Amino acid sequence: MSNSDALWSSVDKLIKDRVALVADSHPYLRSITRKILLQLGVKETHEVDDGFETVEAICTFDPCAVILDWGIRGMDAREVVRVVRTSGIVPNPKIPIIAISGPIKRSKVVEAKDLGIDQLVLRPLSPMLLQQRFFPALMKSIRPPSLPDADGTSLLTPKNAAEVLQVDPSWLAKARKSGDGPPHVRVGRSVRYREADLTRWTKSRRWISTDEQKSSTRKSKQAHSR
């Protein structure tokens, strides 16, 4: 069995042995998410409608993943993630968290990454959209640790880096060639990305306006052409 097959086998076992937690304040939206998860092969779901219940359910059920509404009532999503990741009261602080949100700005992607959210999904939710976020988050949680570089930060493959940035790997390859993408390193003939570099690059891409972004892009291209 290849490493990829073994990984998918582990994911399949995970979603059949443990519940997936759906945390959303809207009953109708919870039902949509639950139906999609069942279509994706999840054996069972548990549903809660506020942030406090979310933390309690995580401690009680140890779910395979949490599908968290960004606007959940009670304890908000940001605080839920902080408690899960840093409080020490949750049995598995690395549990995959997929946040669901309405219209989104790049600053929210950065905020989600900084908080420790694994994937951010836009409404309206569809089976294909959730599948593209749900399974990578699960695979990341059971994948062996990435190779660290000399500074102790993890080195990611282009595919894994694309998952972190939520972009297509082909875009990352083009950006690598043009110089518009995040910094990368060479390990022999292989391309790798440092997690720390991805975080810094993403933060540097915050724009107040489209005009500011265009101006910065022009200056960058002029600098590369010299």
Image (spheres, rainbow, N blue to C red):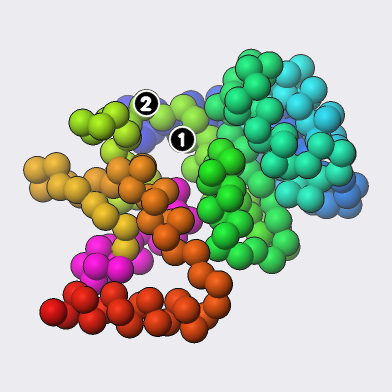
- The alpha-carbon separation of the residues under discs 2 and 1 comes to 8 Å
Name the mark on residue 144. 2
Q: Residue 93 is drawn in which quadrant?
A: top right
Q: Work out whether residue 54 can be spotted.
A: yes
**Rendered position, 213 above or below 54:** below
Name the mark on residue 140. 1
Kind of residue at badge 1: Lys
* Residue 25 is inside the magenta segment: no
Side of 153 where 7 appears, left or right: right
Q: Work out whether residue 31 can be spotted.
A: no
Where does the magenta region start and end?
164-180
Mark 2 secondary-structure assignment: loop
Mark 1 secondary-structure assignment: helix
At a point 46% along the width and 35% down the height, the residue shown is 140
Side of 24 where 172 appears, left or right: left
Residue sticking out furthest to the right:
27
Kind of residue at badge 2: Pro
Q: Residue 169 is drawn in which quadrant?
A: bottom left
